[in-house]
Amino acid sequence: MFRVPSKLSTLAAGSCLSKRGLVDLAKLSSLVDIKPEVRDALTKAPQSVVALESTIITHGMPYPQNLETALEVEQIVRQKGAIPATIGVVNGRVKVGVTSDELKVLARVDKESTLKTSRRDLAYVVSRKLNGGTTVAGTLVVASMVGIRIFATGGVGGVHRGGEHSLDISADLIELGRSPVAVVSSGVKSILDIPRTLEYLETQGVCVASYQCPDMEFPAFYFPTSGCKANCNLNNPVEAAELLSANNSLGLQSGFLIGVPLPEEHAIDRKLIEDATEQALSDAGQNAVGGKEMTPFVLAAISLHTKGRSLESNIALVKNNASVAAEIAVELARLENGGGAAKSGSQRAPVVIGGSIVDTCITVKDDEWKVSTSSYDDASICW
């Protein structure tokens, strides 16, 4: 796994350090495009960058809601003072910060020809010059590669129901255990086995935290509560930033999962979702749907069953998570940059407080010096 140090000044030098030693950044740059806005932020205040995934755009939501949501989420991050970096693959190029035109491409491409791109798929999608929506795992790989430490999404994958028999376990969990990135989400998708997922995350060494939940209740995507407990609770963005900074100082290479509950006004009746989930899983079994196609299939079926209410909740929680992630990013930048401004690229004119002092020294070369109104012909001035 490549991991660029927090300062991208090493890009100019042509190499950086990773777990395995030096990485040839010339080769890396031949495959990865970093948007100028993001590159500038990574150079000046890397903590202020928030990664965003693209599978939500390519496979998670229908058009045009997917495009509208992606654009709105980026705007939310900016309004909070952070820099958004939507990650995806366009025509075989890994994009760290996609342009508006590239967002439109990902939003409208044929889902059959666009791959859900996890770690295992990245090399194939790049080598075949395909389009790819990066999953949580795929986004974590790229984010860690370039030094992004905070990532906002809707919900992470996990252990599927019946996973103790099928061994259907999302690669998201493995990647969380080896990427020093904080993932801000509404927990684990409720269609999964949440207790087993949390057990698996513990095995991977992932710190699971609830956010602003004193009882440490872990959220369940569509629901604010799951009946499961997190390892700890973070009361505000400052506490979250302090946790991330400590992890970085200790040199730990595992990540975090910060569970942000869906606001109550967007929550859906639990029985309605459970009934829809059971029906969707049954339909998936009858139609031999499995693997990476399972989650999109079930989410689409739930949206149909709830007449679009689940999609509305999904959009709401993604926006809320992006807002929280941006707030944490801003606090992390302040904490690690000595209280300096987190946002780079400001267009405001600088304000100078203070003044300039110039010492003047006059040397008179005459033998006699008198205090009078007369002038001296032979004198020198230095500054």
Image (tube, rainbow, N blue to C red):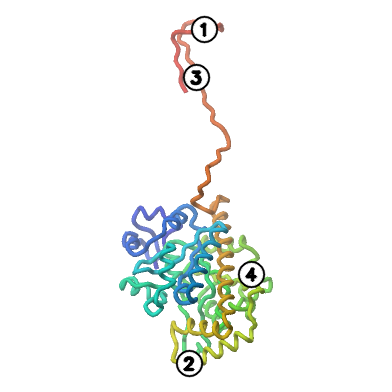
Vertical placement of residue 329 versus 279, above or below: above
Q: Amino acid at mark 4?
A: Asn
Vertical placement of residue 238 versus 341, above or below: below
Q: Nearer the viewer, residue 35 or 201?
A: 35
Kind of element beneath mark 2: helix
Q: Amino acid at mark 1?
A: Trp
Kind of element beneath mark 4: strand
Local crowd size for mark 4, using a 10 Å CA cut-off: few (<14), some (14–19), many (≥20): many
Vertical placement of residue 282 versus 361, above or below: below
Sooner in the amino-acid sequence: mark 1 or mark 2: 2
Q: Specify the quadrant of the image occupied by residue 193.
A: bottom right
Residue labelled with disc 2: 285
Residue 235 in the image, given as x and y percentages of width and height: 65, 65
Mark 4 and mark 2 in contact (Cβ < 8 Å)? no
Mark 2 and mark 1 in contact (Cβ < 8 Å)? no
Q: CA distance from mark 3 to mark 2?
A: 92 Å
Mark 2 and mark 3 in contact (Cβ < 8 Å)? no
Sooner in the amino-acid sequence: mark 1 or mark 3: 3
Local crowd size for mark 1, using a 10 Å CA cut-off: few (<14), some (14–19), many (≥20): few
Q: Residue at x 52, y 89 (%)?
A: 281
Q: Amino acid at mark 3?
A: Cys
Q: Amino acid at mark 2?
A: Gly
Kind of element beneath mark 1: loop
Sooner in the amino-acid sequence: mark 3 or mark 2: 2
Q: Residue at x 52, y 60 (%)?
A: 249
Sooner in the amino-acid sequence: mark 2 or mark 4: 4
Sooner in the amino-acid sequence: mark 1 or mark 4: 4
Camera sees residue 85: yes
- Number of the label disc, if any, that sits on residue 361: 3
Local crowd size for mark 2, using a 10 Å CA cut-off: few (<14), some (14–19), many (≥20): few
Residue 65 in the image, given as x and y percentages of width and height: 51, 72
